Amino acid sequence: MLFSENFTASLAATGINMLFKTRSAAVYGIDAHIIDVEVDFSGVKQAEETFNMVGLPDAAVRESRDRVRAAIKNSGFDLPPTRITINLAPADLKKEGSGFDLPIAVGILGAYGGLAIRDVSDFVLVGELGLDGSLRAVQGMLPIAVAARAAGIKNLIIPAANAREAAVVQGVNVYPVKSLLEVRELLNAASFGTLTAQPLVVDSSTLLDEALEYHADFRDVRGQHVAKRALEVAAAGGHNILMIGPPGSGKTMLAKRLPSILTPLRFEEALETTKIHSVAGVLDAEQGLVTQRPFRSPHHTISDAGLIGGGMVPRPGEVSLAHNGLLFLDELPEFPRNVLEVMRQPLEDGTVTIARAAMSLTFPARFMLAAAMNPCPCGYFNDKSRDCMCTPPMIQRYVSKVSGPLLDRIDIHIEVPAVQYKELRSGTAAEGSKEIRARVLAARERQHARFLETPARTTRKMGGGPTRAVFANAQMTTQQIRVHCELSSDAERLLERAMAQQGLSARAHDRILKVARTIADLDAAQTIAVKHIAEAIQYRTLDRSYWA
């Protein structure tokens, strides 16, 4: 397939430059920005083609010249050697990734007269080109679709492998394509008003309803009634929880079943979570939307950059991938201390800010933390069935790997003892996740209603940035605690006595009140009673000198 020889000859004779503009997008953090791709070529033939690219492209974008040239040639087009200049605007934003291959190729085709359409400003084009002209998926398609809708651009032409992900966004026509030739045919058909291709439609309202049930169920857990109750309280209020117990007591088994009693994802939460997974490149292409709360369980050899995020161009880490879900850290003291300490900001603020010389990006990281640890290096301190072989200095060194400020940010500390033989062999059926989740949902509904009734207090500043809604008791501010955590006189005296005897910090005081508020919500009680405060205090194992 050749371009018109007369067209090229006339340009060569007059020396006229030809300019064609397409639109694409670049992802920064979890948001995307629309990028104008301007292609200019000189009609004067040269001995060799000159390909110049400006606009802060990274190495992957600069390499696109070779992919694009081969893709155009192998798609049947013959380009005369001329000088080609490509500008990615705005020029002060760094462009990275291979998603600019498609808009650059379409811009070159348009500049050389290979397209009937002259104005493609109502199309955003994103995709990586293979040398044969095929299109491959790229990361961050969901933020790109959101950015296109915000910019008022109606049409999105993207690789077929990214189509379900982008089609979740309503108000944008998503056209999945598999090759550069398909893109040319689609644009030419749009030019002549004969577009017959139908955009992909995904009913996002039913995606969450179709979420698969969890295979792990609390019905599988024998015994451990105190631990299961604590996990129910944690799920109901969104509280962080630490489980301490010997090897084989069921800590990991309990943590893996915690997602089965969490509240279902709301669509807004699912969309925000999917954006993070899309940018990180871990989204299932067939799924298109994250429909269940994430469960992330990194190994203790992870680096601080892997946990928090990082890189030359910052990427989300495990705490952001666990946003709106659960982060489980097994064998907590085995994590390097510097890795654990960087979690303080996300645990407190629900965000992670990563600063680099080129840019500073903020990722959301509002998650529940579930952690598990042995009480000592051998694991059998305070175990009734086996003797502990660890010396006090060994235990102290082991425990000191987890700092006090980090433990202070965990609302619930519980002991998970070894399960007795009679409980393991008991024929009595344990309570399942479905029954526990029903109580958790009822408690969350009470919290939602409470915070909606006081809209002026349901948001809080995060480092001077935008405000955010509060959906669970664990997210309450100090002002909200004073408003919503009313104590009876007896409960007030009990809390005062516990503060004095155990030497609790101000942060521990607030965490006890938050947990007690959640326990009261599970009981459908308006006022926090003595039994609610007493149970909340029992969930502060480490404040009672556990290793004394």
Image (cartoon, helix red, strand yellow):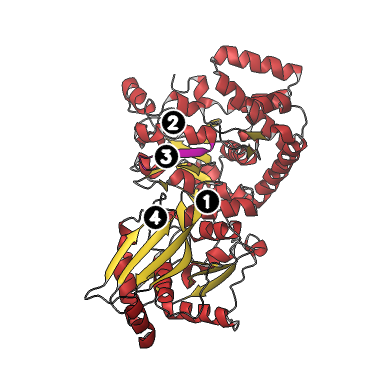
The residue that label 2 is drawn on is 383
- Residue drawn at the location 37% of the way across and 82% of the way down: 10
Find the magenta span and give its range: 350-358
Asked where in the image residue 127 lies, by quadrant, the reply is: bottom left
- The residue mark sitting in front, 3 or 2, is 3
The residue under label 2 is which amino acid type?
A: Asp
The residue that label 3 is drawn on is 354
The residue that label 4 is drawn on is 95
Q: Check whether the beta carbons of the residues at disc 1 and disc 2 lie within 8 A of each other.
A: no
Please report whichever mark, 3 or 2, sits nearer to the chain's N-terminal start.
Answer: 3
Tell me if I can see residue 1 in this picture. Answer: no
Instruction: Examine the structure image and report whether residue 399 is included in the region drawn in magenta.
Output: no
Q: Distance between the residues labelled 1 and 3?
A: 22 Å
Please report whichever mark, 4 or 1, sits nearer to the chain's N-terminal start.
Answer: 4
Please report whichever mark, 1 or 2, sits nearer to the chain's N-terminal start.
Answer: 1
Q: Where is residue 23 drawn, in percent x and y?
A: 48, 64
Q: Distance between the residues labelled 4 and 3?
A: 18 Å
The numbered disc on residue 294 is 1
* Residue 59 position (above or below residue 221): below
